[in-house]
């Protein structure tokens, strides 16, 4: 038996704006919007599909400290320098968390100041399973419950 990461939860003062940023960065879509303004984003095959979803939970309190957990990104269809330029154009900002400048990665922050890293190595894009196939797989008893 093993567990699988289903979703990451990130508190946000403006979940809708942060959803736009992370959807553009990761080629995700909005999957659900809660009455309190929280937003869930993910790959088109949704929760339980090809990638963990990100749940942007509304929280009016400002971020205070460096996150103890952060996201590492890898470029998929271009080199690190080109991906860095794309992320900066989307609204990412360089972040200083004590790095020396000799690292092979870039530390950035999203529009609300949540740190993440852009690594050098390229990874193949994740193949997206159509939603109906993901639901069939989950319903087969081999996958997890999508709820």
Image (cartoon, rainbow, N blue to C red):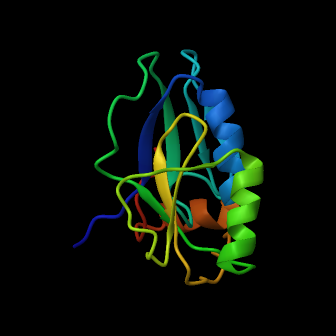
Query: Which quadrant does the N terminus fall into?
Result: bottom left
Residue drawn at 48 percent across, 68 percent down: 140
In the depicted structure, whether residue 135 falls above or below residue 66: below
Residue drawn at 61 percent across, 37 percent down: 111
- Tell me residue 46's x, y (percent): 60, 53
In the depicted structure, whether residue 125 falls above or below residue 53: below
- Tell me residue 79's x, y (percent): 70, 81
Could you tell me if residue 106 is visible in this image? yes
Q: Is residue 65 left or right of residue 135?
A: left
In the depicted structure, whether residue 139 falls above or below residue 62: below
Residue drawn at 39 percent across, 54 percent down: 70
Quarter assignment of residue 81: bottom right
Q: Is residue 124 left or right of residue 68?
A: right
- Tell me residue 15's x, y (percent): 59, 29
In the depicted structure, whether residue 41 falls above or below residue 112: below
Which is nearer the eye, 7 or 96? 96
Could you tell me if residue 27 is visible in this image? no
Which is nearer the eye, 132 or 42? 42
Which is nearer the eye, 35 or 99? 99
Residue drawn at 71 percent across, 69 percent down: 83
């Amino acid at each position: 038996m093993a567990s699988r990461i289903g979703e990451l939860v990130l508190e946000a003062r403006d979940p809708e704006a942060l959803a736009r940023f992370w959807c553009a960065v990761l080629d995700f879509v909005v999957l659900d919007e809660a009455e309190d303004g929280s937003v869930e984003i993910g790959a088109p095959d949704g929760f339980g599909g090809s990638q963990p979803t990100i749940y942007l939970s509304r929280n009016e309190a400002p971020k205070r400290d460096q996150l103890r957990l952060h996201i590492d990104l890898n470029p998929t269809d271009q080199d690190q320098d080109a991906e860095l330029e794309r992320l900066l154009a989307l609204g990412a900002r360089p972040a200083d968390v004590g790095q020396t400048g000799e690292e092979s990665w870039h530390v950035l922050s999203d529009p609300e100041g949540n740190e993440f890293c852009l690594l050098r190595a390229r990874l193949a894009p994740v193949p997206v399973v159509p939603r109906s196939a993901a639901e069939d797989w989950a319903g087969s008893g081999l996958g997890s419950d999508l709820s």
